[in-house]
Image: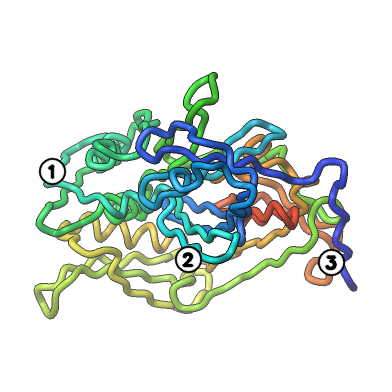
Amino acid sequence: MTLDAPASAAENPYELNWYACDLKTGGVIEELRSLTPTQALSRRLGAPTTASFALNLSGAPTDWEACTAPGRTLLVAVDPFTDTPLWAGMVLTREGGSSDILQLGAVTLEAYLDRRYVSDLLLVLQDQADVITALMAAPLSQGPPFVMDAPALGVLMDFDVLAADDRTALSVMQQVMAMNAGPEWTVDVVWADVSRTGFSLPVRVRAKVGLQLAEPEAVFDLPGCIAEYALAESYEAGRGATLVTARGEGEGASRLTSPDQIAADLEASGWPRFTYRFTPASGITDPDQLAAHAARALALMRTGSSVWSVEGVASRAPRLGRDWALGDTVRVVIENSPRHPAGAEVVARAWSWELTPGADRIRPILVEED
């Protein structure tokens, strides 16, 4: 059986408006009408993503150098159909010469957090949102226009880190997010005010980012907006285990080790034991933190992974930024296919997405969560 890709909605092709902004303030410098992404735009929870661009200088503003200066400028994509900012990245590389085309490389703002280092922190019985806010102290000072969106989560935790360990804000924030029941975070982009003269970068901290609905309204369907899809299931090493142990740094008897985290219910029902050991991050000296990492890993790995890779026609699919966003649950409905001859319907969560506006394609990476 061959899956026929639905035709793009010619009356409403997927387009983006691109703005060059000052990285420090978020203020708009110019609209870049001749800027084109040369790879898919993407975002992931709690992690940076990169993108490359081509700027046709024959159609660029006269101050294009100021608009694209590495380390000084920010590129922001806005969906004009919904007036919603979707993606922002700081320019890090620029290359040009005898060609009319200027090549740019940019990375989402999570990468900036990897260029700032944390100070000594000793946090005892602090709300998880306050812990992330404390780790953002350096980036919030003399950095891009970050604003904290971190309401209290009602979960207290202890956490400590030493400046002497040379830990970046990104590495420590990812460490906290990877703990069992750890808070999730992401860096979004929004209009700074109603005048539409600039952008701000909310650092959203939640127990789970996005809306997790049992019956989400955003539906990717086949036949319908889906051009193709795949379901990848794995119990490979690092993806499936019934016993997980987290190890600290060091050697021999002095090396910190978490208690074994065991999926006793699965093993009692007949699963063989699969063991996984890992070192979650450098600089961990607290046994409780290691145990939290091991418990989180077991929760993700106990029955393996099921990941849906869906490629939809962007102009026909639920609209990114309006109907669904990073962290939200969406519904996948398959009438029939070779993999699912009797059809399938699942609710899965968007842990990342890719958007290729020129090809009119949107690719949410959807994870089935217990």
Task: Identify the element where label 1 is drawn.
Answer: strand
Mark 3–mark 2 distance (CA, rounded to whole Å):
28 Å
Residue 324: percent from left, percent from top = 64, 40
Task: Identify the element where label 3 is drawn.
Answer: loop
- Tell me the crowding category of disc 3: few under 14, some 14 to 19, or many 20 or more residues within 10 angstroms, Cα based: some
Which label lies toward us, 3 or 2? Answer: 3
Earlier-in-chain disc, 1 versus 3: 1
Q: Residue at x 70, y 40 (%)?
A: 319
Residue 360: percent from left, percent from top = 75, 53
The residue singled out by tag 3 in the image is 337
Q: Residue at x 37, y 44 (%)?
A: 183
Task: Identify the element where label 2 is drawn.
Answer: loop
Looking at the rendered structure, the kind of residue marked 1 is Leu
| Image quadrant in which the N terminus is located | bottom right
Left or right side of 237 for 62: right
Mark 2–mark 1 distance (CA, rounded to whole Å):
33 Å
Earlier-in-chain disc, 3 versus 2: 2
Look at the image and tell me whether residue 1 can be seen. yes
Residue 302 badge: 2
Of residues 185 and 32, the one drawn nearer to the viewer in this rendering: 32
